[in-house]
Amino acid sequence: MNIIDEKQIHPNLRVPWKSKEDKFVPDFDKQFDESEIRKFELKVKNYELENPISEKIKEIPHIKLDLPEIDYIKSWDEVQTIDMNTYSQVNLRNYKETKEKGPLLHPHWYSKTLINYTPDSQACQGKQAKEEAAWAYPEYQPYASKIVDGVSRLNSEDMKFYETEVYSSVPTITKFIKKYICDTTYRMHIWKIKDNGYLNWHNHARLPWHNDVIVNDKAIVHLPLYTDFKVNMLVRKNGTIYGEHYSPGTAWVFNYIYDHAVDNPTDVFRCHVVFYVPLTDKKFTKLLERSI
Ligand SMILES: [Fe+2]
């Protein structure tokens, strides 16, 4: 892990306040309801007392998983059988805003979904994907659709998950995950970040568009397949930026509780398979314990 000098990264990622000026993060200054936040923080504390691994891993910027090397060349060949034109550009507007004003698409960030809230890889790519699934596809989300209007935010446990039409295209990846990493996953995506692209600073614990604080009850695992050694995964913790290049064949847990970003200053796009694993998965928590 490297400490990164801000002068070395993309100009839009150099200073935290720069994110506020970035038109692709629209509601950055939205005020939060402090009493609601205190309530969620108490929930988080109780969860962590019952699940100590949650608190341990949320302080670590990058965790390299103790695994054999995945056959990333074969994996990458499989990913390339999926038509790039069918990838979704990430939409930064929520479902209701999108209906009113149309999507606000991230300029550098594309995804193809392998496990989704519907069996369709192209559905639900917005920032309120869970809510969109519950509103637009109640047949696939019978429970979430019943509660969606009464809660501030749906949890992953409220959702059902489906293998999409492209899941079977990448058997080397999915078999590796099942054999070595975990028995269950939530959503799983192929994420591409364009050449000279970046993903701006954000965190999933206190999103600029939500007034809640989330429990660290899952991990985000990255399997890099195609990248350049100059591509950096960045986590900003207490003012310090911790950078790590994730090389093909390795597997990592990327911290999403602290602000994180991706910097791709190269002439190639970067492709990772990324998936969420609940911390209740025993195979996964064993792997985490031996990796930290
Ligand atoms: Fe993120």
Image: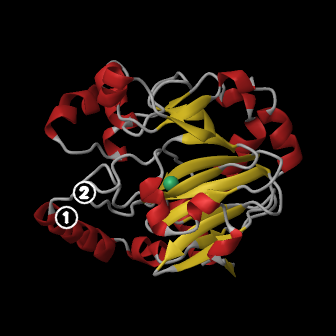
Which quadrant: the N terminus?
bottom right
Q: Is residue 197 left or right of residue 97?
A: right
Snapshot quadrant of residue 92: top left
Residue drawn at the location 74% of the way across and 49% of the way down:
196
Which quadrant: the C terminus?
bottom right
Image mark for residue 2: none
Q: Residues within 10 Å of mark 1 (few under 14, many from 20)?
A: some
Q: Marks 2 and 1: in contact by CB < 8 Å?
A: yes
Residue drawn at the location 33% of the way across and 62% of the way down:
215
Tag 1 residue = 37
Q: Amino acid at mark 2?
A: Asp
Q: Nearer the viewer, residue 290 or 122?
A: 122
Q: Nearer the viewer, residue 242 or 218?
A: 242
User: Element at badge 2?
Assistant: loop
Tag 2 residue = 212
Give the image location of residue 247, x and y in percent: 79, 61
Q: Nearer the viewer, residue 175 or 133?
A: 133
**Visible residue check, residue 124:** yes
Q: Nearer the viewer, residue 244 or 286?
A: 244
**Visible residue check, residue 280:** no
